[in-house]
Image (tube, helix red, strand yellow):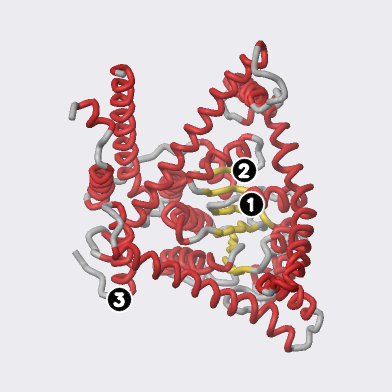
């Protein structure tokens, strides 16, 4: 056992234990740690953005003579008009620019990457069979994916009552949806346990020095 | 209270306590559980392994502290692989908060190699073997801009050096000189790399993501948009296994050492789910 002598490690460890104490029940230690976290996180972000974005990207070049940046600065500062009711409508200008920029940049790219390519991925082609790296079983997996996609889409078709053929496909579709939820839940459990392990590795390793 | 009722009303603190025990004990008495690498991880390993000598690996370390236990082992494993194979490496992040973690992984891995290096040639040298480009906002700028010129997007690296003066950057000018881009992230950033860098410039994209994102990302691997995929701590452990097995890089394996805890924790959670469901089933029958 080789307990850390670093005061920052001690602070991190004590705050971690204070947060864990919530698992027993709500208590003042948890609340203190929670408030410290919020305060530190906000303070860290504000100073980080000041030193890494506002000063080097905006103020320094602006004072060095790049006057075009006054435009960016003015548009950015309009976000704060929200606090002045008489001119709060001006906030729509930066929001509009932001939405316009990202919508224009995002929609065509996402249609290609997440819709067209994904639809191609469900078609029954030799390339898709091979993509499973499962030999002749690739055909079966591709067929299952195709059935799953069509049936799931039919489940979300609400313009007709789910009866007859649509009822059957919708029922199959809900099975696929449930399997998807199950997989997502399983992965979420794995993610959360991984984070717990990471925290224990810190407490038992960096702090207490029990593990190396 | 009958046994059936108890099965559905186990105090959550008992569950937490047992879970903590099964996580802690394998960490205190460690055994590296041998994991079998899955096809998506092998595909990523192969892609990194086959980067031609005139091309580089771009490693996007866009992971924040809250997902560090899952993703940092991936960064370390990929860097060990790349440096062991003497690949050229460019490291970047897309958000400013992630700079510290990326630098930490780089410092750790370069330190591991340099402490064993006997000559200058054996060493991992900044500017010759790798460059830490740092960060430039907003994310769309590097994604699109690096297709034209990397040094134009990053005129200075993380340490303030002029990138066009660095030896490595004389050879790696844009995506044409990039073998694969590996994005390590817990968000939708890998999809953006596909949407912008791959669709427009044809860059191969490999991904390491948190387990939560795994179910969302597998379709992108199936369509070939992701060249390879590591999911969660298990994905990291599989990559560590491949690196140690093939390259004999025997260093600390954070993810592999956690596999036993992860396995036992899953078994315990499954047992509690089964107990709860049996109790629920019998309670409903009684009614």
The answer to whether mark 2 and mark 3 are in CB contact below 8 A is no
**The N terminus of chain B - image quarter:** top left
Classify mark 2: helix, strand or loop.
strand
Q: Quadrant of residue B46?
A: top right
Residue B111, image x, y percentages: 43, 68
Query: Which disc number belongs to residue B180?
Result: 1
Q: Residues within 10 Å of mark 3 (few under 14, many from 20)?
A: few
Q: Quadrant of residue B131?
A: bottom right
Residue B38, image x, y percentages: 48, 37
Q: Nearer the viewer, residue B30 or A175?
A: A175
**Is A87 above or below relative to A25?**
below
The answer to whether mark 1 and mark 2 are in CB contact below 8 A is yes
Mark pair 2, 3: CA separation: 44 Å
* Residue picked out by circle 2: B227
Q: Quadrant of residue A190?
A: top left
Residue B110, image x, y percentages: 47, 66
């Amino acid at each position: 056992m080789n307990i850390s002598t670093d005061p920052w490690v001690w602070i991190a460890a004590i705050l971690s234990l204070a947060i864990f104490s919530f698992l027993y029940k709500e208590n003042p230690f948890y609340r203190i740690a929670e408030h410290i976290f919020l305060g530190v996180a906000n303070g860290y972000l504000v100073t980080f953005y000041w030193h890494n974005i506002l000063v080097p990207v905006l103020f320094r070049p602006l004072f060095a003579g790049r006057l075009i940046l006054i435009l960016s600065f003015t548009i950015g500062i309009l976000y704060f008009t929200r606090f002045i009711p008489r001119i709060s409508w001006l906030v729509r200008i930066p929001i509009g620019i932001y939405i316009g920029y990202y919508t224009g940049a995002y929609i065509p790219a996402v249609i290609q990457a997440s819709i067209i390519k994904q639809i191609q991925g469900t078609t029954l082609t030799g390339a898709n069979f091979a993509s499973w790296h499962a030999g002749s079983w690739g055909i079966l997996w591709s067929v299952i994916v195709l059935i799953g996609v069509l049936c799931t889409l039919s489940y979300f078709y609400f313009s007709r009552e789910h009866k007859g053929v649509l009822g059957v496909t919708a029922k199959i579709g809900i099975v696929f949806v449930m399997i998807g939820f199950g997989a997502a839940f399983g992965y979420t459990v794995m993610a959360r346990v991984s984070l717990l392990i990471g925290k224990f590795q810190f407490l038992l390793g960096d702090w207490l020095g029990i593990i190396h | 209270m009958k046994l059936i009722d108890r099965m559905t009303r186990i105090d959550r603190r008992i569950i937490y306590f047992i879970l903590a025990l099964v996580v802690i004990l394998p960490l205190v008495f460690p055994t590296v559980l041998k994991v079998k690498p899955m096809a998506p991880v092998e595909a990523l390993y192969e892609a990194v392994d086959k980067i031609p000598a005139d091309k580089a690996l771009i490693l996007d370390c866009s992971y924040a502290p809250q997902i560090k236990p899952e993703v940092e082992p991936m960064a370390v494993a990929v860097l060990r692989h790349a440096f062991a194979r003497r690949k050229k490496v460019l490291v970047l992040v897309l958000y400013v908060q992630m700079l510290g973690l990326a630098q930490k992984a780089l410092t750790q891995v370069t330190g591991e190699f340099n402490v064993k290096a006997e000559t200058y040639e054996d060493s991992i040298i900044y500017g010759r073997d790798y460059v830490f480009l740092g960060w430039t906002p907003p994310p769309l700028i590097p994604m699109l801009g690096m297709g034209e010129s990397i040094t134009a997007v990053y005129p200075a690296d993380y340490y303030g050096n002029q990138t066009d003066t660095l030896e490595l950057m004389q050879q790696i000018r844009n995506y044409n000189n990039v073998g694969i881009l590996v994005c390590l992230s817990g968000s939708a950033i890998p999809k953006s790399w596909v949407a912008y860098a791959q669709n427009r410039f044809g860059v191969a994209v490999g991904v390491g993501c948190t387990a939560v994102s795994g179910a969302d990302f597998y379709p992108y691997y199936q369509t070939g948009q992701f060249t390879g995929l590591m999911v969660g701590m298990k994905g990291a452990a599989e990559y560590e296994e491949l690196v140690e097995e093939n390259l004999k890089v025997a260093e600390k394996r954070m993810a592999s050492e956690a596999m036993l805890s992860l396995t036992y924790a899953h078994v315990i959670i499954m047992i509690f789910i089964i107990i709860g469901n049996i109790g629920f089933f019998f309670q409903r029958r009684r009614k």
